[in-house]
Amino acid sequence: MAEPRFQRRKEDRPQEITDAAFSVFAEKGYAATRVDDVAKRAGVSKGLTYLYFKTKEELFKAVVKSVVVRRVDALLDAVETTELDSEAFIRGPMLEFMKSVPGSPIAIVIRLLIAEGPRHPDLVDYYYDNVVARGLAAIRLFIERGVERGEFRREALNHQPHLFLAPMMLSIIWRLVFTEKPLDTDGLMESQINLLLAQIKT
Amino acid sequence: MAEPRFQRRKEDRPQEITDAAFSVFAEKGYAATRVDDVAKRAGVSKGLTYLYFKTKEELFKAVVKSVVVRRVDALLDAVETTELDSEAFIRGPMLEFMKSVPGSPIAIVIRLLIAEGPRHPDLVDYYYDNVVARGLAAIRLFIERGVERGEFRREALNHQPHLFLAPMMLSIIWRLVFTEKPLDTDGLMESQINLLLAQIKT
Amino acid sequence: MAEPRFQRRKEDRPQEITDAAFSVFAEKGYAATRVDDVAKRAGVSKGLTYLYFKTKEELFKAVVKSVVVRRVDALLDAVETTELDSEAFIRGPMLEFMKSVPGSPIAIVIRLLIAEGPRHPDLVDYYYDNVVARGLAAIRLFIERGVERGEFRREALNHQPHLFLAPMMLSIIWRLVFTEKPLDTDGLMESQINLLLAQIKT
Amino acid sequence: MAEPRFQRRKEDRPQEITDAAFSVFAEKGYAATRVDDVAKRAGVSKGLTYLYFKTKEELFKAVVKSVVVRRVDALLDAVETTELDSEAFIRGPMLEFMKSVPGSPIAIVIRLLIAEGPRHPDLVDYYYDNVVARGLAAIRLFIERGVERGEFRREALNHQPHLFLAPMMLSIIWRLVFTEKPLDTDGLMESQINLLLAQIKT
DNA sequence: GATGAATGAGGATTCATTCAT
DNA sequence: TATGAATGAATCCTCATTCAT
């Protein structure tokens, strides 16, 4: 009645491996993670990893994409379908989202991109196209809509949407680097939103 | 004979190696730089590198510290000795400094810290103590002085100094990751300063 | 329904696999052929290959034997049953056979034996017993018969039968190694036969 | 007074490694030899092997060339400088050389070329240019000279020089494959030379 | 019988570090 | 000091073989 030595679970394996890989990459960075460790953490053999991902690099890309793919759309949908007025939306769902990012896998992916980006330009492009460009476009659209509705001044359009995101980025980096040092990252983002709204509200 | 015309002085060696190392780390990241390459770029033998730095890791730390040490003090001095009024100082030397950072070696060091920080906590501490803490303290001090002088409102003290730096951080990261994609990073920082000054000026 | 039109019969499987294996071994040599490729080329699963051949080595042996088995007998039969006189037989069927060898699977097998022989002594023995020994014996027999019939001089018996085969071997090797460089291998074999016949004819 | 752990012998290393590699390749063939074994046999570390030869393949090529380079010239020189008459030269130094080949490193190289040639076309070209082409040219030249001197008939020129070499090739292959089975390879080559000389002498 | 997912030992290659010179 | 030859542990990747289905 010996336990079977392994299971055949073709469907689940790639995701399992990708998840394990994410957690190892998160801990050690790209170069320092051994494919062996990924396999171990996924509970599979090293060989199987190579069955699904031809190289460590390909695995890395799959990890980044898998994290990205799973997260982007929600907010963008929310922007388009919300029935809140602009300010309420910003202070509500949008702020909520921004607060969640520094502690989320997205932050890890950002770390990996900062560290490995120069060696993986296609990954950077992928991330730009699927996250950054879409995010910025959504903010821009959102402001335009606010202007049309008379909730924002016309000059709001001149503001760079990046300004909304700047404290979030600072918070991400702070948490990544200074894990120990507390920082009221939520307060930071709230203040910035107050600052910006004070400027652009009618 | 054949005396080399310019005999390198021993005292410069560590700095030369450190400089070479910085440029290789900047290009390839920690894991991907080979000590051999550093030595080659410094124009010395690999063995000599190990004479001055016991391990690659120690070399790495020396690099980070060397960059940091050379850059921090100038601005802090300026804060203390300037004769400009607060707004003029912010719009002048301070903005100038912030604009310079994303293209400076500091940006590279930040990349290295983001990537390697978790494996080098003492480096992170060093950086925090010598750059971040002092920088934030200086900003805080500066605001206090502005308040005392009646240039800033008392509420200005409630503002987190991090907000001044957020767009700079975003700019740094953007330039590190999206080398290709242009972004008006200067405009970003100017806008933020306008935003903040509008709030705190008397 | 969807019954496959041509159901492969089980009995053919080993031969199909063996054929596929031959073609892969021929292309890549023993070490560089992957069992996976053999299976793919045979249109079966890797597992099935292992059902018929316990190891890659066993498959290899089966390949060599299968090629050998299919080719030896014809010529030997011809020697025994021909009604041609000795010279006519040599200049006719025998020369024809020798000309055909360098382009035939036998040449490939020879390459494999040269490369892998030392690691597969039993294969070498098999090849020797079933091809070489029988071939040489046949030539010897043939010469004896020629002597008895008065077609060859008695001294012909002193000649080593290998001499008949030497240019064939050179041709085989040449074609295996110098695929690009043309060589009149047929002319070579004809000349040698002229040479030998001139010596041994009565 | 501990023994030094290693010696610095830059000059000798490549040749030592190449020699060791030859002997391992000879035993096991290209694919089956481990760089580790080569290093061990050379008495150096694996790493050192890679200092001198960037890849296993490069090492392989170096081995082939090193064997070839050391052997070709002697005979060719002899052809040009001999004072023997043609027949004496053939029966003497030339036959001697041919007899020596099947037991020499050249035979091993031939085995390696037969086995690995298709994967190393440049090696094949190298061997062709440096050994085969030059060897055949020398034989051709030699026959021409014999004709001019009146030692050979004019028709000798029509003979393919390959015929001189055919029994040598058979002997090489035989000894490589059928190590156990004795064959009077010397007698084979002598007979062939008798055969040929009988045809071409005046 | 068939399949192909899963295993894991094995081998090429790299590179931080040491040490003879 | 200074060099760079030499070491060997570490790691990616392959592929023969097994075995759950």
Image (tube, coloured by chain):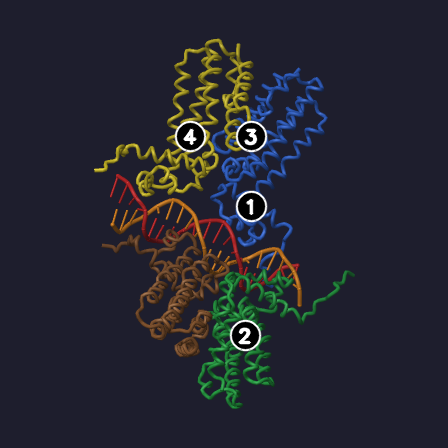
Chain colours: A brown, B green, C yellow, D blue, E red, F orange
Q: Which mark is residue D58?
A: 1
Q: Nearer the viewer, mark 2 or mark 3?
A: 2
Residue that sits furthest to the left in the current view: C1
Residue type (three-letter) at the residue carrying disc 1 = Glu
Three-letter amino acid code at the position of disc 2 = Met
Residue C127 numbered mark, or none = 4
Q: Is residue D134 above or below residue B65?
A: above
Regarding mark 3 in the picture, which secondary structure is present there? loop
- Give me the C-alpha separation between circle 2 and circle 4: 82 Å
Query: Label 3: which residue?
Result: C181
Answer with the quarter of the image where residue A27 lies.
Answer: bottom left
Q: Where's residue C27, x and y in %?
A: 45, 36
Residue A176 can be seen, yes or no = no
Q: Tell me the residue that label 2 is attached to.
A: B98
Q: Is residue C34 above or below residue A161?
A: above
Residue B71 versus residue B27 in the image, above or below: below
Quarter of the image for the C terminus of chain A: give it.
Answer: bottom left
Q: Counting other residues with Cα less than 10 Å from the Cα at mark 3, is it few (<14), some (14-19), or many (20 or more)?
A: few
